[in-house]
Image: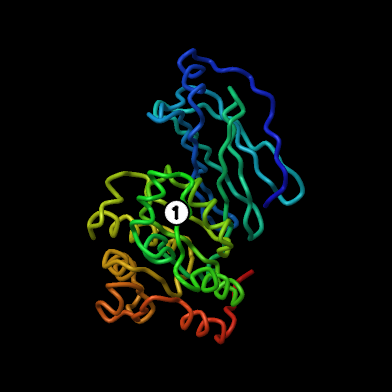
Amino acid sequence: TGRPFTAPAATGFRHTTSKLAALTGARHHAQDVIVPPAGRAALVAKLAYGPVWKDLEDEHATFYLDNCAAWVAVASVRTDGDGFATLPVNVGLPAGQYEVRVVARGDRSQTTLNLWVLPAGTHVAVTDIDGTMTTGDTELFQQLFDGSYVPVAYPSAVALTKAHAERGHVVVYLTGRPAWLLPITRAWLTRLGFAPGPIHTADSNLDILPLDGSVGAYKAAWLDDVEADGVRIDLAYGNATTDIYAYKTSGLPVTKQWIIGPNAGASGTNAVASSWAARTAQVAAGARVAQPF
């Protein structure tokens, strides 16, 4: 990851409507993907423009992957009526994190996703973001209205993720944020120095409602999917009752959950008051995780 990337020359758009939409500025995003080394995955990018999120329809997009030697063009596809560029792939890569760029060929605008190739048996630590790593859910709303705003992290939040990484865990960021906030979410995690890890956001606006049957169900279903591929969820962090619901529904005991803020200790979870410092010290003093890679 981090290799300099230069998009190919723009080819121009197939449709005049696309050319006009592109004048309003790219708003592309793409979800990270977790897949076993010999697994099959769908790489998906949403390509859209401007404040009204005009979908880039019926236009060419190319997927590029850093294979640890160079950037390689994987394949080109045409976007559908909702602006999605979807590329099914047989992975066939060693365990690791691989950066992927998706380029709208019409104007060479692009977005990024990370392909995490994780063998069966990989141990992960899962965390929510808003109200868990940040000091409150309102931090998200401030960022929505002010793109330059930098959400405030709880004390020792960054150190907690780094402690897990040093102990061998892959840290997974599972959030109820809408998918179109992926780029600024990635930028925030990187800017503050959080441990690298897969990020997953809600694809549907129906999945962001603060209800067990909405964001809780969406998170539980996604956790079930990665567990079906052999990922082992060792423990999890959150702040809301919907986090507890999601983790319990996916089979994680409350004794393996740490909840911060007003719901700390709810339903028998481990209570955390206003800082992750004590928990960070526990993790740092713990045994290293035996990963299958």
Please provide percent x and percent y for residue 134.
42, 63
Disc 1 crowd, CA 10 A, few/some/many (<14, 14-19, 20+): many
Task: Give the residue type that dot 1 points to.
Answer: His
- Name the residue rendered at 56%, 87% in the picture: 285
Question: So how many labels did they put on this image?
Answer: 1
Residue 228, image quadrant? bottom left
- Name the residue rendered at 51%, 79% in the picture: 280
- Name the residue rendered at 59%, 62% in the picture: 193
- Position of residue 276 in the picture relative to residue 37 (left or right): left
Please provide percent x and percent y for residue 199.
48, 55
Furthest-right residue in view? 69
Residue 139, image quadrant? bottom left
Q: Where is 212 relative to 183, above or below?
A: below
Q: Quadrant of the C terminus?
A: bottom right
Mark 1, secondary structure of its residue: strand
- Name the residue rendered at 49%, 47% in the picture: 184
Q: Where is 279 relative to 134, above or below?
A: below
Please provide percent x and percent y for residue 132.
39, 66
Q: Give the image's coloring scheme.
A: rainbow
Circle 1 residue = 200
Which of the two residues, 145 or 76, is positioned nearer the viewer here? 145
Please provide percent x and percent y for residue 46.
46, 36
Q: Where is 95 relative to 65, above or below?
A: below
- Position of residue 54 in the picture relative to residue 11 (left or right): left
Q: Where is 188 relative to 100, above or below?
A: below
